[in-house]
Amino acid sequence: MGLPGKVAVITGASMGIGEAMAKLFVEQGASVVLLSRDQGRAEAARQRIASPDRTLALACDVRKVEEIQQALDAALRHFGRIDIWVNNAGHGLLDSVANVDMQDCRATFETNFFGALAAMQAVIPVMKRQGSGSIINISSVAGHLPLPFHAIYSATKFAMNALGKAAGVELKNAGIHVLTVCPGYVQTAFSENSLRGQETKRVRPSSVKGITAERVARAALRGYEKRKREVVVPWTMHPVIKLYQLFPAVVERAMRGMAKPAKA
C-alpha cells in the first residue's frame, strides 16, 4: 500500500509531527491538506513543503465540529476524496492532580480527545462511501504509562488509545483501517506550548534527548503501509511499557525519583 495518488488530511500540521508527516507524505506521492487553528502557520508550513499543486492549507479548530466539517468539505472539493485522516492536533498540560484547573483539564480533553473523536465521526461516512480509508491517531507512550504531573494529558492519550483500537474493530469490515501511533519523547516545541498550572514538574531521564518528528512520521508511514493497529516509537519504549504492565511499582519508583521542576 503506497501513497501515490492518495489524499491525506492532517490536523495540527503547522509544526512538529504534523508538519513532518505532511512533508513525508508529499514526498511519497500523496496530496495533503494541512490543518491548523492558525491558517497563517498552516500556510507557512505548506510553503516550507514547497509542493503547491499537491497541498492545501486551511484553518481548523478541532474543538469546533463545524470547522472540522468545513475543512473536510473543502478537502473533498479540492481533491475529490480523502484516503487518510491524521488526528495530530493536541497540547500538553503540566500540573498535579491535586491542583489542576478544571477549565484547563476540559480544554485539554476538548482538543486531544474530543477533537479526534469529532474528526473521526466526520470522516468515517466519507470513507465508508469510498469503501476504503485509513485513520491515524497520533497518541503517546503516555497513553500506556500514566505520567505524574502530566496526568490529564496521559488521560487524554489513554482515551485516544482505547478509541482507536475499538474503532479499528468496528470499522474493519467497512474497509477502514485505524492506526494508533505512540511516540515517546519527541524533539518538538510541545512542552513550550503546553498549558501550565501551579505544580509544573517533568518526568524525563536526563540521558534521554528525544527522537525527531521525522522519525515519528516515518514510523507512522510504515505502520500505515503494514496495516498495523499500533506503533510505538522508539522501539526502546516497548520494554518500559511491558515493565510497567508487569511491575508497576518499579516504574513508579523511578518516576518519583526523576520528577524535576519544569523550566519556564
Image (cartoon, rainbow, N blue to C red):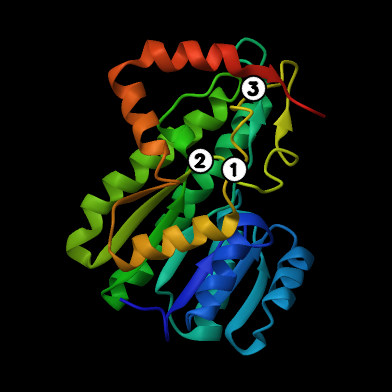
Q: Quadrant of residue 36?
A: bottom right
Please tell me whether mark 1 sits on a helix, a strand or a loop.
loop
Q: Which mark is residue 102?
A: 3
- Residue at which label 2 appears: 184
Q: Which mark is residue 171?
A: none
Q: Is residue 58 visible?
A: yes
Q: Is residue 245 above or below residue 183?
A: above
Amino acid found under the numbered disc labelled 2: Gly
Q: Which tag is nearer the camera, tag 3 or tag 1?
A: 1
Q: Is residue 124 visible?
A: no
Q: Is residue 242 above or below residue 216?
A: above
Question: Where residue 81 sits: x, y (%)?
Answer: 43, 80
Residue at x 31% of width, y 23% of height: 245
Please tell me whether mark 3 sits on a helix, a strand or a loop.
helix
Residue at x 55% of width, y 36% of height: 109
Q: Earlier in the sequence, mark 2 or mark 1?
A: 2
Of residue 224 and residue 213, the one placed in the foreground of this image is 213
Furthest residue in direction left, as rendered: 173
Left or right: where 23 falls relative to 198:
left
Callout 2 touching callout 1 (CB < 8 Å): yes
Left or right: where 145 falls relative to 27:
left
Q: Which tag is nearer the camera, tag 2 or tag 3?
A: 2
Amino acid found under the numbered disc labelled 1: Gly
Q: Which mark is residue 210?
A: 1
